[in-house]
Amino acid sequence: MIDNKIKINPKDKRLARIIAIQAIYASEIYPENSDDIFDIILNSGEEEEWLPLESTPTKDAINYGKKLHKIVMSNKDELDDLIKKRSKNWSINRITLLDKLILRMSLAEMIYVNDVPPKVSITEGVEIAKYFSTDESGSFVNGILDSFYNDIIKEEE
């Protein structure tokens, strides 16, 4: 668990997750630009309408987005193993890239961020998948994350 808490409201946290998923996607596609990825994302904003929310990200939202990005990039293999384990009859290569990245981010938040309840990470992952990915993505993401959550509950009992 990562304990350096960033206190932000739910609206800003959603925006942070959206920033993070864009950075994770960009890092996956253009790994050579990963050092500059947040500058690129945050400076391309208004004219491209890259955010589905009508607000400029706060410093805390940007920092939380960076935190999620760093956690995902540092734990990619472990997160992919968790996805593989729960995607029965599906090769991880058949999962759309965006769904896989949303799953990585949500799982990372569930595992490594101790001030966010797992159910919130699940709900946020599902909502982001519905907004950015396919019509079926919300259900798919929910199924994988819920399976992980249920396994955590069983382990705790």
Image (spheres, rainbow, N blue to C red):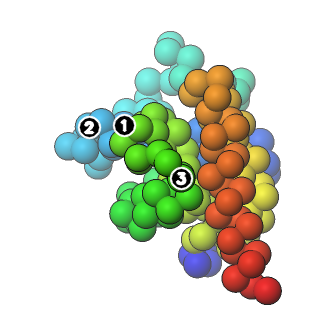
Residue at 47% over, 45% down: 90
Quadrant assignment for the N terminus: bottom right
| Apparent side of residue 146 relative to residue 98 in the rendered image (left or right) | right
In terms of secondary structure, where does tag 3 sit? loop
The outermost residue toward the bottom is 157
* Label 1: which secondary element: helix
Residue that label 1 marks: 26
Can residue 62 be spotted in the picture?
no
Residue where numbered disc 3 is placed = 88
Q: Are marks 1 and 2 in contact (CB under 8 Å)?
A: yes
Q: CA distance from mark 1 to mark 2?
A: 6 Å
Disc 2 secondary structure class: loop
Tell me which amino acid carries mark 3: Lys
Look at 56% across and 58% down and name the residue there: 86
Q: Which residue is mark 2?
A: 30
The residue nearer to you, when weighing 41 against 26, is: 26
Instruction: Say which label, 2 or 3, has the lower sequence index.
Output: 2
Within-10-Å neighbours for mark 1: few <14, some 14–19, many 20+? some
Q: Nearer the viewer, residue 52 or 9?
A: 52
**Residue 116 found in image quarter:** bottom right
